[in-house]
Image (cartoon, rainbow, N blue to C red):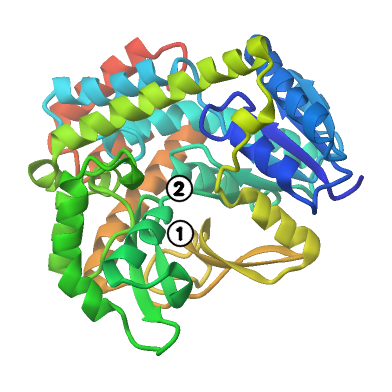
Amino acid sequence: MKGKGVVLVGADSAQFGLGTVTDIISSKALRGGTIILHDINPRSLEMVRQTCQIALEEMKPDLKLEATTSRREALEGADFVIISIEVGDRFKLWEQDYEIPRKFGNRQIFGENGGPGGLFHSLRVIPPIIEICSDVEKICPDAWVFNFSNPMSNICLAVNRKFEKRVKIVGLCHEIFNAEMYLPEMLNTPMSNLDIKAAGLNHFGVLLDVKYRDTGRDAYPDIRMRAKAYLENVRTSNDPKYGMDRSLTLILDILRIYNYLPYTHDSHFGEYIQRAWEQTDHQRVHEFYESYKQFCLREHERLKTIVEQRLPPSSWFKPSDERVIPMIEGILSNSGQRELSVNLPNEGIIDNLPQDLVVECPAIVDRNGVHGVKVGRMPSGLAGLMKNQATVQDLTVQAALTGSKQKALEALLANPIVDSLSSAENMLDEILRVQRDYLKLK
């Protein structure tokens, strides 16, 4: 049925694949539609297909299910395309992204989205996503593309530049959930009573405004008074409700210095700040990485168990809490709903950041798609940090789109995390050698 063909590119994603399918099956608005699973790994794809089939047979939600390793076949007639891909052995390459810069004296703290590791990650993943979007432009040009893959900002900026907005892409990240988790406890009020405005760059944003709905009163004085004690308790707690990442030392310093609270953790925010190394709880960041790695590995084993034992959905069927399916529902129903956080081209959303930069911002969803909500100016100190990253992202995208080693070196040297020419040249040469199957620069 036109308007209800949802394609999952990277259906084997441990974090987003099965959860997104669960959300589709639970959606009344998508009844009568088709779920199309696409992955380049046929064995993994078949495992996901069988898992989904168990749920469809049990729940009978009036949905068709297709699975194919052919991207062109998957995209035929697609209305919504959800991308969640990685390249190669994700964790092996991630660890190289982290360790090789450190070998040459660089002090990055995570290596996924910012710093040298973020550059290397971008150079690997942007080219295949450009290929996916090239097929979208040719086969289903009216489809909305929702991207979960990282590095989010670089990917979305590359797609917008390559296709000059002929591909309608929205980046989605769940970091805003941290605010939804912390603020009600910190402020002793339900989230439904809080009106928040958050913006910045992906993994590098802050809460700009928080108000109590019942009184209209500014909640930031309470946040500034209570955040340190509350987040210190979270940081030292072993309560699993707070998630895996509880490195918050840098975040508290950002609040103290700039007077605004980030809605992510040290592992993400600190990738963009040169002084983060000395402020970050590295043990917590390492524990977060290891926990996340084990979580992803367990998810694949869980799929295998579901299929082999044919476990009923009642034992594993759980909505993901991600916002992509509610947003698709909003487009189909012309809802006008407000979303707290999406990634879109700036275009006047944040006045004092470059206008073609991809920013993280609130949005309105209607029949015409996803529209960023203007937030005005970022606080000047934070805007300065983000303008640094705008230059790095510009050069990173140039390197990825042209395959230029020279531009990759320029991106490294523009990055505030890199403080040595010889270190930059040596780490780039080594990563190109070690990851030569994935990085093709001239």
Q: Is residue 361 above or below residue 168?
A: below
State the residue at coordinates (58%, 44%): 159
State the residue at coordinates (19%, 36%): 284
Helix, strand or loop status at disc 2: helix
Tell me, for residue 339, which label it has, or none: none
Q: Is residue 335 above or below residue 416?
A: below
Q: Amino acid at mark 2?
A: Ser
Viewer-nearest residue: 283 or 201: 283
Q: Quick check: 221 left or right of 205?
A: left
Determine if residue 109 is in view.
no
Q: Amino acid at mark 1?
A: Val
Determine the CA span between mark 2 and mark 1: 7 Å
Residue designated by label 2? 153
Viewer-nearest residue: 90 or 58: 58
> The C terminus is located in which quarter?
top left
Q: What x and y, as percent, mark residue 299?
A: 50, 23
Viewer-nearest residue: 240 or 429: 240
Q: How many marks?
A: 2
Residue designated by label 1? 359
Q: What x and y, as percent, mark residue 265?
A: 27, 49
| Quarter residue 128 falls in | top right
**Mark found first going from the N terminus, 2 or 1:** 2
State the residue at coordinates (29%, 25%): 290
State the residue lying farthest toward the right.
1
Determine if residue 41 is in view.
yes
